[in-house]
Amino acid sequence: MRCDVYARHRLDLSPGNIFFGVGSCLLPLRRGRLESEVLGLCSIKDNGLVCHSVRSGWDLWLGAQDFRAGDEVLVSAVTHPDMVRIIRGHGLRAVPVDIDPRTLAPLPSALEAALTPRTRVVLVAHLFGGRMDLGIVAGFAREHGLILVEDCAQAFQGPERVGDTAADVSMYSFGTLKTSTALGGAVLWIRDHAVRRTMRHTQAHYPVQRRVSYLKKLLISLGIVTVTRPQPYGLLAQFCSWVGTDLDAIVNRAVRAFPSGEPEQAFHRRLRQRPCKPLLAVLARRLKSFDLVRLDARSASGERFAHKLRIADAHPGGRSLRRTHWLFPVVVRDPGSLILELRTRGLDVSRATSSIAVVDASDGHTPPVHARRMMSGVVFLPVYPEVPPRALDAMVNVISDFAASDAIEVATLS
């Protein structure tokens, strides 16, 4: 194991922002002023809602609807499992819609095949830092009288770019791994005034996130920011290897907001709370000082890498729009071998950088073949501005050499 290792993901958070959050935990703050400031910075002051997380907002929105048990929500076949869990928790059915791996948008034929008289909502997820063109899915929703919700948790590109007018609801996350993270919080743009009013009324009765819980997140994030520099991260990887500890498990546990396998009651208790005032203060600060320079640098780094990658079909989302490369995935036949090879070169690639997964189809619905094939071989690469060109070139060469020698056959995405 090398001494210097480039971590799979860098938190988009400076020590200065962390210390500001710690200080905010000690100050009296005004919730109303902070919430108005956050929504105003996103230009949705009268049409938005600040929530504890996107999952919290999704749960609130579903609770404000007048759906009947057994009604259906069409869902992008690759999304966060908790979004599906929340759908089912409201007595509804989640129906996966297969995606085109090149654009990461739902396939029109799959949308038509999934439609039934019980369909009420279409939930689409923008993946990996890019955006899909909502034109086709929005037209489909309008034609069939469906509500269109866009999950933009992975696609925040600055406060001046919040929401697509083609959608009825737009949801943005500022969780630990997200762009311009505040270590929590979400902004929702809800076009329906009555639904928004109901959501606000319901959320007003939620308990407030404990400051000590947020303070703990801040301190953990300070450790993550420190340890994910190349030399400390290399030492951590070495230590894990020596003692037989799973590095993936340590990293995922440190950044996960909702523990996996959490009982239903505890899950809903974690969902149904309001963000504490220090979190709102940090979120307002991040929006006011949004780092467009770093976002552009990350986008440019990802585009250069994609251009050099000679196997273009191995990169999901190669034809998505406004790509900022929050994550950079490739798909290969044998992801385990690729991971081992790149880790020997000081590159912490992983299959577990994101918690997204394929949504299983229930009886009577077509399984999402393209989504399953894509996710079966996906590997996430550390492609961000702090990774030097020599390391990026090494990744390109390894992926290309593996494919050329048939040690790994690149999985077809078409």
Image (cartoon, helix red, strand yellow):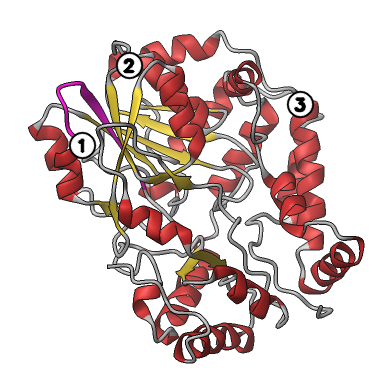
- Quick one: SS at disc 3? helix
Q: Which residue is rendered at x = 40% and y = 74% of the image?
A: 314
Q: Which residue is identified by label 3?
A: 211
**Is residue 397 shown left or right of residue 105?**
right
Residue 196 lies, in percent from the top left, at 36, 18
- Check disc 3: other Cα within 10 Å, few if <14, some if 14-19, many if 20+: some
- Check disc 2: other Cα within 10 Å, few if <14, some if 14-19, many if 20+: some
Total number of numbered discs in the rendering = 3
- Quick one: SS at disc 2? helix
**Is residue 298 shown left or right of residue 117?**
right
How far is mark 1 from mark 2, CA to CA?
Answer: 26 Å
N-term mark: 3 or 2 = 2
Q: Toward which corner of the image does residue 94 lie, by quadrant?
A: top left
Q: Which residue is identified by label 2?
A: 195
Q: Which residue is identified by label 1?
A: 114
How far is mark 3 from mark 1, CA to CA?
Answer: 44 Å
